Image (cartoon, helix red, strand yellow):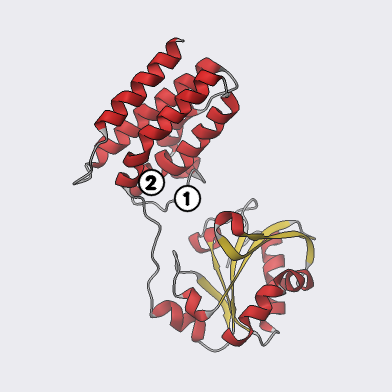
Amino acid sequence: MDLPEDHATVLRRLQAAISADERFIGLAAGGSLLAGAMDAYSDLDLLVIVDNAHHAAVLSARRELAGEWGELLAAFTGEHVGEPRLLICLYGDPTLHVDLKFLTLDELEHRIEDPVVLWERGSAVSSAINRTQAARASQDPQWIEDRFWVWVHYAATKLGRGELFEVIDFLCFLRAQVLAPLYLAQHGEELRGVRRLEKQAPAFATALERTVAGYDRQQCTEAVQHCIELYRDLRDSAGSAGLVHRTAAEQASTQYLAQISRG
């Protein structure tokens, strides 16, 4: 496995500690390591597979355990991303971001990707992966269409009030949650927001540049308008059978945006 030196150093340390503890039955990796796209700026995304009998105790002590596995500078759990089993760590010597998700074998069967097994006690981890299928993340065009024009109206109200920081945050949201996922889904790529988009889809990344605005009302207005143009192109090029266009909402929100932009 070809890893950057710092990543290899931390991974060896973690694997040695985990494999020496009888409560653990496996260690697997996802993310950049799984995709073969790891570089010096990548995180380590690790799945720590715990024996059912010890899972609750391990979860309650996971920060202390992580501290025993290296120089733990900071750590917090992942409730903010809807994943309380996750411990997000910053290790020192070398300094590296490591995500540790503590799972049972049963929980491993419900996943969005097939991780690479780095170590296991016996073959239980590999067997669990081989007998089940990953449910990959997908994007529902109707879910987006049902919401998009409400979001446009929201942005227009913030432009009208002069809340430009809110509009700038909204533009980031649209790029990561709507525009990039729609483009990637249409091209059969993994949905990861705007991560690695410059390499993965350089032409589309260039188009997205027009949706980036500084702290300027005119720039923010034009960026929202560009988001609308890109969304319409993506929506219409997909040709989704059965997609219901929210035409009335589209007309009302775009007219309101035009009114605000003239004001």
**Image quadrant assignment for residue 59:** bottom right
Q: Amino acid at mark 1?
A: Arg
Q: Residue at x 75, y 56 (%)?
A: 95
**Mark 1, secondary structure of its residue:** loop
Q: Secondary structure at mark 2?
A: helix
- What x and y, as percent, mark residue 5? 69, 61
93 or 90: nearer the viewer: 90
Q: Position of residue 115 (x, y in %)?
A: 49, 69
Please indicate whether residue 136 sits to the left or right of residue 102 in the image. left
Position of residue 135 in the picture relative to residue 165 (left or right): left
Query: Can residue 220 be seen in this snapshot?
Result: yes
Instruction: Report which residue position mark 1 lands on.
Output: 192
Q: Which residue is mark 2?
A: 184
Q: Quadrant of the N terminus?
A: bottom right
Nearer to us in this view, 127 or 55:
55
Q: Could you say where residue 226 lies in the image, as x and y percent from the top left?
A: 41, 25
- Give the class, few, some or many, for how many residues have Cα within 10 Å of label 2's Cα (few <14, many ≥20): many
Q: Nearer the viewer, residue 245 or 215?
A: 245
Image quadrant where residue 254 sits: top left
Q: Amino acid at mark 2?
A: Leu
Instruction: Mark 1 and mark 2 in contact? Answer it, CB < 8 Å.
Output: yes
C-alpha gap between disc 1 and disc 2: 9 Å
**Res. 2 in view:** no
The location of residue 99, given as percent across then percent down, is 63, 62
Q: Earlier in the sequence, mark 1 or mark 2?
A: 2
Give the total number of marks visible in the rendering.
Answer: 2
Tell which of 205 and 6 is nearer to you: 205
Placement of 183 over or under 32, stated as above or below? above
